[in-house]
Amino acid sequence: MIGWFVLAIVMAVVISGTMYLALSPQFGGRASKAQKAVYAQSGLFKEGRFWNTLETKMDIEYGKLMRDYIKKDSLRSPSKPIEVVPQDSADIANWDLSNDQLFWFGHSSFLVQIDGKRLLLDPMFSASPSPVPFMGTKRYSKSLPILPDQLPTIDAVILSHDHYDHLDFKTIKAIRDKVGAFYVPMGVENHLLAWGVDSAKINVLKWWDEIYLDSIKLVFTPARHFSGRGVFDRNTTLWGSWAIKGKSNSLFFSGDGGYGSHFKEIGEKLGSFDLALMECGQYNKQWQAIHMLPEETVQAAKDINANTVMPIHWGAFTLALHSWTDPVERTIDEAKRLEVSVITPQIGELVLLDSITASTVNWWKEYVD
């Protein structure tokens, strides 16, 4: 009887898990055969998957890794909730359109104004980057600079890839009706369509595709990473980085990825950038191929000819084993060594792109015991 009872429990868990994977909207949509045929023409898609141009392998010792994650370490998260600089909806709606500026939501999310257009980069506004929120890591701050429903009209959302800490179901549902256009990698359009985004708003790009939003030139550039939201959809959507070139100012948005020769290629093809929003956190030697170390972050900024670098992909969630401040501190140290200008604004702090500075320095020190 005990054996049958255990078997029944196992079967119930398997069935429940399968139903959740099949029915939960969090996992998004899948490509049709016709779409896959189009993807195959890109030269980046074969055998049903997208591929990096550089060999990208991870050598993960899963047993040791699980033991390391289970070990408690107070340095992996702040000693108290992070306070953010609040932004007011009316103020944003009335921003001087002649000012190019941005502010950070933490991790990799930004609101950018450039050439009078308001852009959201990888908006992820939920409390946890997980399809099962109660099981995921929690956001370091109790609030955001501004809530999704308080945002004014957004001209465009720009997405780098479909991982949960960059593409969030609840966020897209909350903002979809106030967004004029979405610019996404191949395959990601199916998630948006499954979540009720109007197909007429969605622009799908592969690496090196260019598109204009009025005067703003958007180029979807390579990255060395991977994708997937479920158990069986790894690399079925493309990933990448973005060059955003306005009339007076230009940004590079790295998305996620390991270091590689593609950064030099981006710099050679697209010239210099005023500010690089560059991934520097959630790394480990075991997955260095798909997440840069902070020292590589600075070198990547030099490779793309960035005048200033802002370290991102930290400051909001614990997704790796390093201390939560290690990414920014190592980035600053390496930037000093290589004589690269770096800014580290507080979450929510307004940064003007015509004179790139941040008034706060080492703000994270307050949150370390």
Image (cartoon, rainbow, N blue to C red):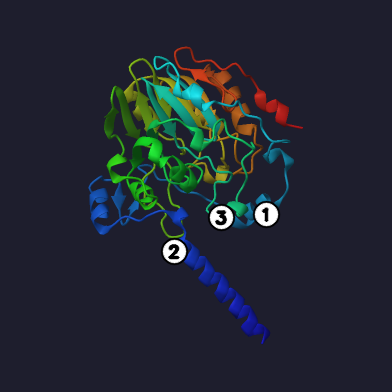
Mark 1 closeness class: few <14, some 14–19, many ≥20 residues within 10 Å? few
**Are the residues at dot 3 and dot 2 in contact (C-beta closer than 8 Å)?**
no
Q: Which residue is mark 3?
A: 132
Label 3 vs 1, first from the N-terminus: 1
Q: Which of the image's four quarters has the N terminus?
A: bottom right
Q: Amino acid at mark 2?
A: Ala
The location of residue 299, given as percent across then percent down, is 48, 26
Q: Which of the image's four quarters has the C terminus?
A: top right
Q: How many marks?
A: 3
Q: Which residue is mark 2?
A: 22
Image position of 236 with respect to 365: above or below: below
- Foreground mark, 3 or 1? 3
Label 3 vs 2, first from the N-terminus: 2
Q: Is residue 77 left or right of residue 191?
A: right
Q: Residue at x 72, y 44 (%)?
A: 73
Q: Which residue is mark 1?
A: 67
In the rendered image, the residue lying farthest to the bottom is 1
Q: Amino acid at mark 1?
A: Arg
The location of residue 338, given as percent across then percent down, is 53, 19
